[in-house]
Image (cartoon, rainbow, N blue to C red):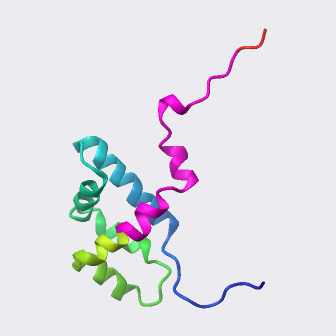
Amino acid sequence: MGKKIGGRPKVSHWGITQCMLYTYGYQKRYKLTTWNAWQRLTESNKFPAIVKQLYKRFKNKDYYIDRMLNDKSVRDKFYTNNVKRRGKDKLLNYVFTKKKDFTRRKKRK
């Protein structure tokens, strides 16, 4: 199989990571659910910079950035299809490891 050519470019992995980290931060700081933390992030001043980071590889990025900033249904679908799905990524699971899941090393005798 050869290299895949064409199709829609994928959104930036760093942009998805930023979305997850800010969502997680709002969730902990304001005691919100994940969905409400995402809604709060979309209303913040940081969101336009994150959206520009997400669509930096696209040719007609102005169109996608404009849709994301102005249309609420696009933001909601983006959350369910990208942020929520990629939140199961191994890197993000490693970052958000709970204290009870850490392994304890026993001292050698």
x 48%, y 30%: residue: 99
Seen at 28% across and 57% down, the residue is: 35
Q: Is residue 11 left or right of residue 76?
A: right
Q: Please state which of residues 16 and 59 is positioned toward the viewer in this rendering.
A: 16
Residue 5: image location, x then y, percent: 65, 89
In the figure, 109 relative to 35: above or below? above
Asked where in the image residue 69 lies, by quadrant, the reply is bottom left
Where is 89 relative to 98, above or below?
below
Q: Quadrant of residue 31?
A: top left
Q: Magenta stretch containing residue 92, yes or no?
A: yes
Q: Is residue 37 above or below residue 31?
A: below
| Residue 61 picture quarter | bottom left
Q: Main secondary structure of the magenta part?
A: helix
Image coords of residue 64 (percent x, y): 36, 84
Magenta range: 79-106
Q: Measured from the top left, where is residue 6 in percent x and y?
A: 60, 91
Q: Quadrant of the C terminus?
A: top right
Q: Quadrant of the N terminus?
A: bottom right
Q: In the displayed structure, does residue 59 sit left or right of residue 75?
A: right
* The residue positioned farthest toward the top in the image shown: 109
Residue 89 in the magenta stretch? The answer is: yes
Q: Residue at x 77, y 13 (%)?
A: 108
- Of the pair 69 and 77, the residue shown nearer to us: 77
Q: Residue at x 41, y 61 (%)?
A: 84
Depth check: 17 or 86 in front?
A: 86
